[in-house]
Amino acid sequence: MAERVEEIWIEKYRPKTLDEIVGQDDIVKNLKSYVKAGNMPHLIFAGPAGVGKTAAAVALAREFFGDAYEENFTELNASVAPDTAVVLRMGDTVTSVSFEELDRLIFGSSEEEEYAILQGVEVLSVADYRIKFMPVSAIARHKAERILRIKHEGGEISVTPDHSLIVITEDGTLAPKLASELEIGSFLVSFGGAGGKGKGEGEGKLPAEPFLNFLDNIAPMGDVCGDAAVEKRVILDAIEAIDVEGLREEEKEAFRTLKKLACSKLKVLKVTDVREEGYNGWVYDVGVPHTEMFWGFVPTGGAAATTPVLLHNSDERGIEVVRNNIKNFARMMPVRGKFKIIFLDEADALTDAAQSALRRTMERYSATCRFIFSCNYSSKIIEPIQSRCAVFRFKPLSYEAVKKRLSYIAEQESISITEDVIKAIYDVAGGDMRKAINALQSAAAVSKDITPETIYSITATPKPEEVETLIKKALYEDFFEALDMLNMLLDDKGVAPDELLTQMHKTLLNMEIPPEKKVYLVDRIGEVDFRIAEGANERIQLEGLLAYFHLYGKRRVEGA
């Protein structure tokens, strides 16, 4: 591998054996018993991110197959052209980089490796109609012989025919559509100014169909009915004329979806040409758990670039992959072993149809193939698959487990870290080992003299004492001082609103506040979290939360 990969500590210090996995002693003991017996059942690894699920699967394969583990172990791959660029964030550094550049950094001169885990890196994506950075699970590549060059109003993008781009459906939701199914006049999703009130109001267009379907017989849109796309300001005017209270419950839900879309920064670009060409080279993808989407564009030199469009990460969640890719691997005889292992990461994102097809594949090839499903929630795996697997539930790593691994890495890298630094890293990362290692590496790159302040700064995480001060100011002191502190955290320190809300929740539970008061305040934090998730303005909601804290604190002091 290239030298760059060796510099990524998450990869450099990934456990190679089961003995190197920390914090999951009972699970490791059971997995070792499988190795000793020379056989294993299908497995489900369930638990939060960064607790050792992928590491355990790879280490298990290594111990079963030794040097032949790569031939007997597979994951899934991808399909975007090398000139496509994405926007990445690692720590507080944001940069745009093409897949061609990523290939050189990650795979170097290797012509064999097709997969690399990149946790600790985030890519610009979309979640609940909001543009935001989301964690990357991996980068994958494979060879392709055909490619589609899709020209649109903002430039062009190149993908393989079986890759998907994101479109807006007839009910206003975002969904993948195969590139091979696109035609001239189709709409791709891009982004521009926000459609809500204020700067950028009404910028761009959205498809008319979902709004016409909803507004028909409720609030007719008049002369825009014949258009394929509508200016967002027209849509907003029509939405504001709707009597929401008069809607049925299912209509209210549809209304909320369409309003979030209209008030978002999303817009559409019309496809102007689709051309299939011969191709002989690598194509790429990034795994983006939970959203399965990322923004891609083509740099055109200097600061210029084509307008970004929303891409779907690899289409390996659907039934065709189970019928083709997985089945083809499963039917092959193992190399120097009794069986092969198929590892399905983020398996809870598989469609129900794909899971049902997979159940039949598991039965047919049980003599030569074993499956390991990795997921956050085992309840999202259909019951027929669960009943065929041994389920292992990975717990968040304890402070002692994280401390042990960080101390080992610090010793290997010849850096000195104190107990306070490790506590700060654990406060930032919780039980997520990947996040902890990434925080340590980012801090070491800034300064060899690592302090707790360095950790909080490079991860853009507020210190617990800062959050506690913010809460106390809002509850007992000057409300406007609390507002100033909120602005300082959001603007000067770059703390993400959702991260601040999470820290407020965690800090509040540990503060010396009467239990009955905590109940009301935690309930309010939950309400604000829901509103933000539904698309409300983050700053206004946080300011409103501080206002509620202040009014509640004042009322309690006055005995009201």
Image: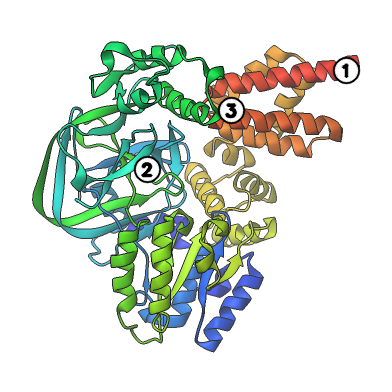
Question: In the picture provided, is 163 more to the left or to the right than 212?
Answer: left
Q: Amino acid at mark 3?
A: Arg
- Could you tell which of marks 2 and 1 lies nearer the N-terminus? 2
For the residues bearing labels 2 and 3, Cβ distance under 8 angstroms: no
Classify residue 356 by image quadrant: bottom left
Label at residue 557: 1
Taking depth in this image into account, of 115 and 428 the one nearest to the observer is: 115
| Residue 475 screen position, x and y as percent | 78, 21
- Residue depicted at x 39% and y 86%: 337
Assign the N terminus to one quadrant of the image.
bottom left
Inter-mark Cα distance, 3 to 1: 28 Å
| Residue 546 screen position, x and y as percent | 69, 21
Closer mark to the observer between disc 2 and disc 1: 2
Per the image, the residue denoted by label 3 is 531
Question: In the picture provided, is 195 more to the left or to the right than 404?
Answer: left
Asked which secondary structure carries label 1, the reply is helix
Closer mark to the observer between disc 2 and disc 3: 3
Classify residue 112 by image quadrant: bottom left
Q: How many marks?
A: 3
Inter-mark Cα distance, 2 to 3: 23 Å
Taking depth in this image into account, of 270 and 120 the one nearest to the observer is: 270
Protein image colouring: rainbow
Dot 2, how many residues are within 10 Å of its Cα: few (below 14), some (14-19), or many (20+)?
many
Is 422 rendered above or below residue 389? above
Dot 1, how many residues are within 10 Å of its Cα: few (below 14), some (14-19), or many (20+)?
few
Is 294 rendered above or below residue 119? above
Per the image, the residue denoted by label 2 is 293
Assign the C terminus to one quadrant of the image.
top right
Classify residue 353 by image quadrant: bottom left
